[in-house]
């Protein structure tokens, strides 16, 4: 009971500490990922020989390869095929 009473007495202080911790977590993630400024980096899935591969273009090529393979091919085979052809 004494511990709960001390927590109740310092509840504002604890709320401020928890809020600062959450805020610092969000800020750290923004700084690490570059925030919304580096949207181009999020659409690039790989760089091969200095050429960036766009996520949507790769997905489009994989979908086309999957259709060409038909029921005999898997999505992994289509991804490998597109990766070799690129």
Image (spheres, grey):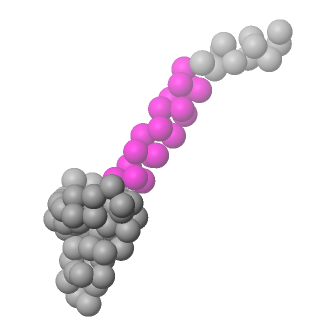
- Please name the residue shown 38% across and 49% down the image: 27
Q: Eyeballing the image, is 19 above or below 48?
A: above
Residue at the (42%, 53%) spot, across then down: 28
Q: Which residues are magenta?
A: 12-30
Q: Quadrant of the N terminus?
A: top right
Please tell me which residue lies in front, 43 or 28. 43
Instruction: Please state the horizontal and vertical placement of residue 60, each as a whole percent of the image.
Output: 17, 60
**Residue located 47% across and 38% down the image:** 22
Residue at the image point whose x is 24% and y is 81% from the top: 85
Residue 19 is a magenta residue? yes
In the image, residue 22 above or below residue 31: above
Q: Quadrant of the C terminus?
A: bottom left
**Image coords of residue 79 (percent x, y):** 33, 68
5 horizontally vs 31: left or right: right
Query: Can I make out residue 64 in this image?
Result: yes
**Residue 47 percent coordinates (x, y):** 28, 80
**Is residue 18 shown in magenta?**
yes
Total numbered labels placed on residues in the image: 0
Which secondary structure type mostly characterizes the magenta part of the structure? helix
Between 56 and 47, the one lying in front of the other is 56
Question: Can residue 62 be seen by looking at this rendering?
Answer: no
Residue at the bottom extreme of this rendering = 49
Between residue 51 and residue 4, name the one nearer to us. Answer: 51
Q: Nearer the viewer, residue 50 or 56?
A: 56
Picture coordinates of residue 62, whole percent (x, y)? 25, 63
**Residue most extreme to the right:** 1
């Amino acid at each position: 009971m004494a511990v709960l009473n001390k927590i109740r007495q310092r509840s504002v202080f604890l709320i401020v500490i928890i809020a600062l911790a959450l805020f610092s977590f969000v800020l750290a993630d923004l700084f690490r990922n570059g925030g919304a400024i580096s949207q181009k980096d999020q659409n690039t899935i790989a760089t091969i020989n200095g050429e960036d591969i766009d996520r949507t273009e790769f997905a489009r090529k994989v979908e086309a390869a999957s259709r060409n393979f038909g029921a005999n091919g898997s999505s992994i085979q289509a991804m490998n095929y597109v990766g070799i052809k690129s």
